[in-house]
Each structure stands twice: as C-alpha cells, then as structure tokens.
Amino acid sequence: MGGRTEGVVTGGGGRSGGVVTISASYGAGGADVGPAVAERLGLAFHDRAIPVEVAGRLGVSLAEAEANDERVARGLWRIVASLGAMPDPVGGVVPMAPQPDERAYRQQTERILHEIADGPGGVVLGRAAALVLRDRPDALHVRLDGPPEQRLAAAVARTGHSREEVRRDLAGNDAAREAYVRHFYRCDPAAAGNYHLVVDSTALPLEAVVDLVVTAARARGVGTG
C-alpha cells in the first residue's frame, strides 16, 4: 500500500479536510493502514513528524522528544537543561521551566494535534489523538486491535523477525502506549467507547480494513474529495 509524505500543520488557513485518528495496538497494522487511508482521502499522514515538531518547539533533540513520545513507557521520561522561555508559534511567549517535564511534551503534542485538525486536517496515528480531539464533529476515531497471538503472527510476517523478538516488542509497545494514555488521560486506550469504529485488523486483509476506514471517514465528512 502506498503512503503520503508526513508533515505537521503549523498554521491555519483554508477549510479543514477533517481528521482520522487511528489507535493501533502492536501488530494491528496501524503503520500500513494510516498512510493508505491518508492517500485515499487526500490528506496528510502524521506520525513520526509529530515528535520532530515537538523537539523543534521545545528546543530539544529529536531523541529527547521521542523519549517522551507515547511509544516509550512512563518512567523513561528524560530531562534536558537550560531552555528558558520559548517563542509561541501562535504569538507571544510561552513561559517554560528551566527543564521541560513530561507535561510540556504532552501539551506540545496536544497543541500540534489541534493545529492539524484546525488546518487542512489529516490522518494521525497514535498520540491519544482520539481523546485529545474527541469532541470534533469533523473527526473519525478508529481503533485497530486483535488477539495478541494473531497480532504476533502478523508482525512476524511483516517484519521477518523471530517470534521471540516480536513477542518482546509487542509486550513493550502495548505496555508503553497503555501507560501513556492511562497516565495522561486516565482511561484504557482499548475501550471501545473512545472510538467510532473498532476493527479486528488481524481478521481481515489490510486492504479491506482501509476500505472500512475510508468509507466511515467519508460518512463523517472527512476527506478532500
């Protein structure tokens, strides 16, 4: 499946094309489904570009931003020194503590998600975006999941890595994402009530999953064409 170049909206302008948020457990195919849905809807895909933007706004390295991303379990938060006040991209100055803490990373991530939604829109993978943007009428919130053994088999087939290596990755990634959402938003990321559409993406070909998400997104008015 094809993908689109990732980017982050840094300003408004123009009517939003709406937002699809995708929460995906490890092995559920989020990294494949997200870009394909974005391609079909004519929207930008946002994943790795988000920590890049966070790093730029906080004046830290990409490694520091990624260490505070949802993929890293709580308890691995790292700190950096000597930042002072940072310019606010919207105007004015945001007073910052000498060292950004985990809340600063989360607040910048949320600000970026709102800018994406208020700008041209896009497809966002992870970052608890369904919770951050839960009240928007121009959004579709999707959860991709499946039984752990089926997700394990799918990830082994896609990566070619050993079952034991993938099993460790699956346990670590699922725990990290759950810790992030529970810590900041006090809820279970797998709870069906957080989403409009929940799909067992291990039970269907990923092309069929993309079709389902695109159909649901268009029914919500999301997309450029």
Image (cartoon, grey):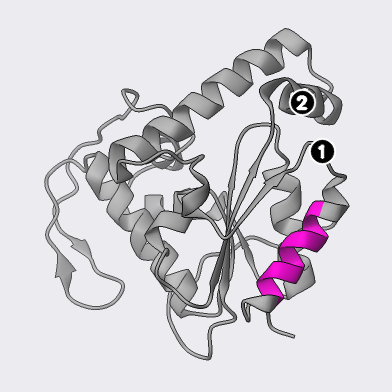
Contact, CB < 8 Å: mark 1 with mark 2?
yes
**Which residue sits at x=79%, y=57%?**
210
x then y, percent, for residue 127? 46, 49
Q: Which amino acid lies under the numbered mark 2 shown in the image of this protein?
A: Gln
Task: Decide if residue 52 is in sight here.
Answer: no
Q: Is residue 181 left or right of residue 107?
A: right
Secondary-structure class at tag 1: loop
Which quarter of the rendering shows the C terminus?
A: bottom right
List the residue tagged with mark 1.
Answer: 203
Residue 86, image quadrant: bottom left
The relative height of residue 123 versus residue 173 in the rendered view (above or below) is: below
Q: Nearer the viewer, residue 72 or 189?
A: 189
Q: Is residue 19 left or right of residue 65?
A: right
Q: Disc count in the image?
A: 2
Q: Which amino acid lies under the numbered mark 1 shown in the image of this protein?
A: Ala
Query: Within 10 Å of the Cα at label 2, are there few (<14), some (14-19), or many (20+) other Cα atoms?
Result: some
Task: Decide if residue 113 is in sight here.
Answer: yes
x then y, percent, for residue 98? 12, 44
Residue 63, image quadrant: top left
**Which residue sits at x=70%, y=77%?**
218
On whether residue 70 falls in the magenta region, the answer is no
The relative height of residue 166 versus residue 139 in the rendered view (above or below) is: above
On whether residue 214 falls in the magenta region, the answer is yes
x then y, percent, for residue 211? 82, 62
Q: Nearer the viewer, residue 84 or 192?
A: 192
List the residue tagged with mark 2.
Answer: 150
**Which residue sits at x=79%, y=12%?**
162
Secondary-structure class at tag 2: helix
The relative height of residue 174 versus residue 127 in the rendered view (above or below) is: above
The range drawn in magenta is 209-218
Q: For the view shown, which residue lies furthest in the top direction? A: 164
x then y, percent, for residue 146? 69, 34
